[in-house]
Amino acid sequence: MALEDAKNQVDTAFTRTDPRGLAYENAFGGATSFLRRRYSKDLAGVDLAVTGVPFDQAVTHRPGTRFGPRAIREASTLQAFDAPYGWGYDPLSELSIVDYGDLAFDYAHTASFPDRVTAHIAGILAAGAGAITLGGDHFITLPILRAYAETYGPMALIQFDAHSDTWADDDMSRIDHGTFLYKAIKTGVVDPAATVSVGIRTDNPDTLGVTILDAPFVHQAGVADTVARIREVVGTRPCYITFDIDALDPAFAPGTGTPVWGGLASWQAAAILRDLAGIDLVGGDVVEVSPPYDTTGATAIAGAHVATELIALYGWSRRKPAAG
């Protein structure tokens, strides 16, 4: 069946009628929605919306993440043929997932951008769907979390990152990808006691009460202990995962604005995400993929895999029970 589909499918981003199921069109052709999901603004009956926020005006070093959502979607075409490996179920067939497209905003009116993001995500949540967001720089996580906090209250947060992003910044009008977590905590949208940052390897003594599992801890303690500590921190609370691609070592993800050596290997990130199955994940993002700094496309490929793992995590507790 897959072979026949491969011969006949094209542009399933527009032509598919069922939001569930794998896709078999050629990876090198066709319209590049995320995992060949249908592009749609209709969220009726939708479990999960994948959306892009192509914004990079808050970076402190190298720009280019505005091209991240497009590159991640293109890279994801390599994964649309099969269920995500290692999960034991197929979220693409069990969940109704659409590609909700990108956020529209005025690039020359930066001050209005945060509220646009919050309203965009709030609209998805109001329709009863969850959101997986493709960035974009890491600032976008702050207005996304505001939308989530309006629904769930102060969020439990798992942050994968090279940087803590808790540098002091009490000017709420500033838009800075390095202070998103500081402001999220200070404004009450994130609970620091239920927040854990994984992969940190830049110095910032003021953690604001966030549990830090830095990169050396992960390397030395291993995946199992890292996952156990994450679970201990977030517990059973509704949880959001933000994955800055610079959590990975530059050997695995060179295409990012502020690379730092000594980071996670891709296999470590994959193993940690899969072993978190069962947490109450209500949404997530992958940010800081900057395609201009990676001619191989490896960073976008990593970003697409992270987003797919987030989908699998989201669907784990919502999947159909196994037949007895």
Image: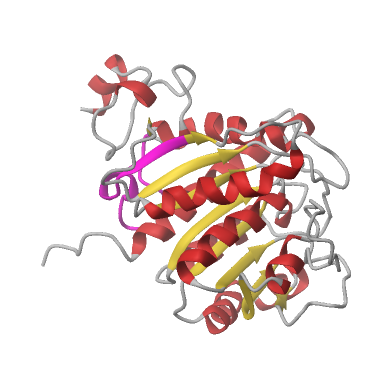
- Dominant SS type (magenta): loop
Residue 49 percent location from the top left of the image: 42, 45
Label total for image:
0
Left or right of 227? Residue 203 is right
Q: Is residue 199 visible?
A: no
Left or right of 13? Residue 323 is left
Picture quadrant of residue 178: bottom right
- Please name whichever residue, 254 or 150, is drawn nearer the observer in this view of the structure: 150
Give the residue at x 54% y 84%. 232
- Please name whichever residue, 201 or 99, is drawn nearer the observer in this view of the structure: 99
Q: What stretch is highlighted in magenta?
A: 81-100
Q: Indicate whether residue 114 is drawn in magenta.
A: no
Residue 123 percent location from the top left of the image: 45, 48
Instruction: Examine the rendered structure and indicate whether residue 81 appears above or below residue 44.
Output: above
Taking the view exactly as shown, the residue that stands out farthest to the left is: 324
Quadrant showing the C terminus: bottom left
